[in-house]
Image (cartoon, helix red, strand yellow):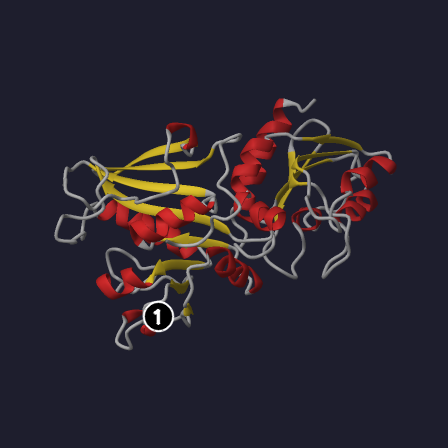
Amino acid sequence: MATDAEIAAMRRALELAARGRRTRNPQVGALLLSPSGETLAEGWHHGAGTAHAEVDALSHLGSAAGATAIVTLEPCNHTGRTGPCAEALIAAGVARVVYALPDPGTKEGGGAERLRAAGIDVEAGVLGDEARAFLDPWLTARELDRPHVTVKWAQSLDGRAAAADGTSQWITGPVARADVHRRRAEADAIVVGTGTVVADDPALTARDSETSALFQAQPVPVVIGTRAVPPSARIHAHPRTPIVHATHDLAAVLDDLFDRGLYRVFVEGGPTLASAFLASGFADEVLTYIAPTLIGGPRAALTDIGVTTISEQRRFTITSVDTLGDDLLLVARPASGAPSPSATEGEMS
């Protein structure tokens, strides 16, 4: 059973993991504790080709004999660009390893067994729920062989995304919009439909809301739909080359993005596209920005998502509710055991 010191160290390891770059590799943090529970060294994975978190932590110590290693992900048992972390911990003489999540990789997994075979005490599952939430995008890509999809929309209190004449800028305030741009910068791709491009001509960049300066990290703009993208559309000036899919087949689009190494997809494309992703079952996370205003009229934030009777409702679990200026941000994920869409769904209507 994990000690209080080990649980506290795991929380710190998750903080360290967040310092790593968001790439196709997992963000991992690690600490080394003395037998009395004091922190000896810290480390995290800085990016592809660099030392893994455990090895990074070990590099700051002359000797780790008898220490306890705290790691957010099971130490790997695979030689890639770097050697197996399980072997490095064994060679360093650690006495105990505590980790949060098992590695789902068929090649990378098995580190715990290797450690135990070497006589090292191993504790698994410490703060596992927190680690899974943190690594959810990476785990989705590894386990489902498709990108992790976040669907975002802004709405009024009465569930409208625009006024009756189609105007929608701005429903939410500057703090909420700044949060959207921060999340865009964390995504690999930002996805909209051709209808949004034609109607709103969005730039689809991640920008500082005060200065309008572009963030260094920019998502690749992706446009879905059979309507032509106007040559004058602002997305052509995006710092990343746009990807245009003249199709309504969302599964095919996600397959293509996955093959391109785009594992975090941020869907911002209006009611039709958002509803299509929800109907298909491809929404791994929903961000709903709610403004304290009433609009009325026919322009709902969502359209048909394939629910015809109450027993078919798509249940979600709310993971957080935050106040952003005058607005609320509700974050939700599909509830476990919720009804799944039929296998034939996955195309925009």
What residue appears at the point 58 percent right and 39 percent down from the top-left corner? Answer: 13
Badge 1 marks a residue whose secondary structure is: loop
As drawn, is 31 to the left or to the right of 89? left
Front-most of 319 and 167? 167
Quick check: 252 above or below 274? Answer: below
User: What residue would you read off at disc 1?
Assistant: 238
What residue appears at the point 87 percent right and 37 percent down from the top-left corner? Answer: 117
As drawn, is 328 to the left or to the right of 42? left
Q: Position of residue 277 (x, y in %)?
A: 42, 49
Amino acid residing under circle 1: His
Q: Is residue 349 visible?
A: yes
Q: Position of residue 242 (x, y in %)?
A: 40, 70
Occupied quadrant, residue 302: top left
Disc 1 residue crowd, few under 14, some 14–19, many 20+, Cα 10 Å: some
Quick check: 45 above or below 308? Answer: below
Front-most of 224 and 179? 224
Q: Position of residue 93 (x, y in %)?
A: 82, 40
Front-most of 49 and 171? 171
Q: Quadrant of the N terminus?
A: top right
What residue appears at the point 75 percent right and 51 percent down from the top-left corner? Answer: 107
Quick check: 55 above or below 37? Answer: below
What residue appears at the point 70 percent right and 26 percent down from the top-left corner? Answer: 36
As drawn, is 88 to the left or to the right of 269? right
As drawn, is 297 to the left or to the right of 54? left
Residue placed furthest toward the bottom: 231
Q: Is residue 315 visible?
A: no
Q: Position of residue 17 (x, y in %)?
A: 56, 45
